[in-house]
Amino acid sequence: MVPIKFGTDGWRAIISDTYTIDNLRRVAEGTAQWMVQRSYQKLVIGHDCRFGGEMFMREAARIFADHGIQVFAGDCIVSTPMVSLAVLHYHADLGVVITASHNPPLYNGYKLKSSHGSPSLPMDIEAIEALIPDFAAEPTHAFSSCLDDGKIKLVDIQSPYEHHVREGFNLDAIRSSVSLSYDAMYGAGQFVMEKLFPEMKGFHCDWNPGFKGRAPEPIAKNLGEIVEWNKSFPGKYIGIATDGDADRIAMVDPFGKMIDSHHILLLLLYYLAGIKGQKGKIVVSCSVTNKLAKLAAHYGLEFITTKIGFKYIAEYIIEGDVLVGGEESGGLAIAGHIPERDGIWIGLTVLQLMAETKKSLAELIEEIYGIVGAFVYDRIDLHLNPSEISRIAKYLSQPNIEKWGSYKVIKKDQLDGEKYYFENDSWLMFRRSGTEPVLRIYVQGQDSEELKSIQNEVLQELQLNQS
């Protein structure tokens, strides 16, 4: 029996290794028992573009139906935000998404969504995890018979989301102000984006569960084609990229420069608080730029830092009065939408900001820099073996690390990982991934020269090579 543990964003495992029909049944069984204990009766389930997604979704749906739970199953490939919105639409008690988000192609996964349309809260995830049995029998009823009996209903989850987006934005104004390029990364955002913007320049907008051999994560090394396209037409295109289940985002400016999540968060806050005059808390994970705290203070807003994992941010969003929430990894949320990350919604919000102000991304970012100061950011992901991880963990456990290379530490934070602050708002952070065997090294500097200097000195001190 393989122990099943939920990471920062659900359960993920390698297909045919640990992610099997038998283990999926176990996870669904634990989830169903948790629902029955609470007299929960309705569930929405969907799957994204990953290998075996529909098969795994149908098997989980059968488990829930066996427990007398009414299942609303997506009738096609859907994004995670679509499932979250459908939970609200059907007044469901829980949502399940068969997805491994931005993980490499070999993975699939299982995300849980609360009745609020947000990621399930940590205490609920822990309770479900505790109920996962060592073995779960094959469901009693076939999927087809569950459809005939009405225990499972195939429903259109995509169209209500499309309608929600059309209601939320002035798409004509956006179209008239910018030309859009979009990289779906072979993910679930492609179908609705092609309907919303049929004229856009699309990349990887077809079904390929192998993702052409790379992880569908919207970071610079994976977005070469859309970057080069924008460079080829200077000043014309704004690029949006979303991950495998379309809840994370990156953007590319009209000259092929990446706009990371830190800058997108700053743009969102600038728009909602600075231009629209909205109020609320700013809640972000500890790997987000400290410049956001400066901008929040500028507008007189409360700033809260959480552990990494959107579920921690979701706790505050559910309580209410959160204006902007987000993570360094590109999972961002704003008031006025579902309490959930949504790459498409966030991207269109930035485009609407540009349309309303008639300003370019560069002009808007320069205005923000005028308030908080300029900065650059980068993240290195190192795939390390257990002995290397152990060696680095031992090094980082030292109580009094006073400097990294020539950079003096003025403050240390251990909320989630190890974060070291230097002068001039620069910082360094280490953290192991919650879903992959990866050590992440986050660095912020005043400019590219300082950023590279910090990275090089840190790697040299830890005797590591960037790969």
Image: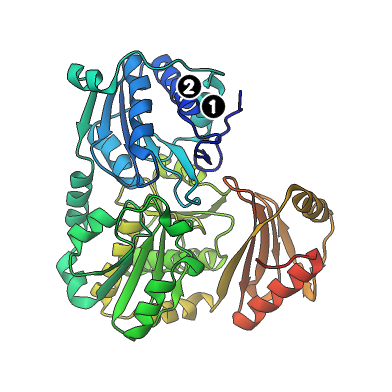
Can see residue 71?
Answer: yes
Question: Label 1 amino acid?
Answer: Glu
Residue under label 2, please give it.
Answer: 30
Percent coordinates x, y for residue 125 in the rendering = 51, 31
Please say if 253 is above or below 335: below
Q: Which mark is residue 287?
A: none
Picture colour scheme: rainbow
Q: Earlier in the sequence, mark 2 or mark 1?
A: 2
Q: What is the distance, in whole Å, between disc 2 and disc 1 at their CAs?
A: 7 Å
> Residue 52's quadrant in the figure?
top left
Mark 2: which secondary structure? Answer: helix
Percent coordinates x, y for residue 153 in the rendering = 21, 27
Q: Quadrant of the N terminus?
A: top right
Instruction: Kindly identify the residue that appears in the image at 67 percent across and 65 percent down.
Output: 428
Instruction: Kindly identify the residue that appears in the image at 44 percent across and 38 percent down.
Output: 111
Percent coordinates x, y for residue 356 in the rendering = 24, 73
Outermost residue toward the left in this view: 172
Mark 1: which secondary structure? Answer: helix
Bin the neighbour count of mark 1 within 10 Å (Cα to Cα): few under 14, some 14-19, many 20 and up: many
Percent coordinates x, y for residue 20 in the rendering = 49, 31
Whether label 2 touches label 1, CB < 8 Å: yes
> Residue 462's quadrant in the figure?
bottom right
Instruction: Kindly identify the residue that appears in the image at 66 percent across and 49 percent down.
Output: 415
Residue under label 1, please give it.
Answer: 129
Can see residue 299?
Answer: no
Please say if 39 is above or below 460: above
Question: Label 2 amino acid?
Answer: Gly
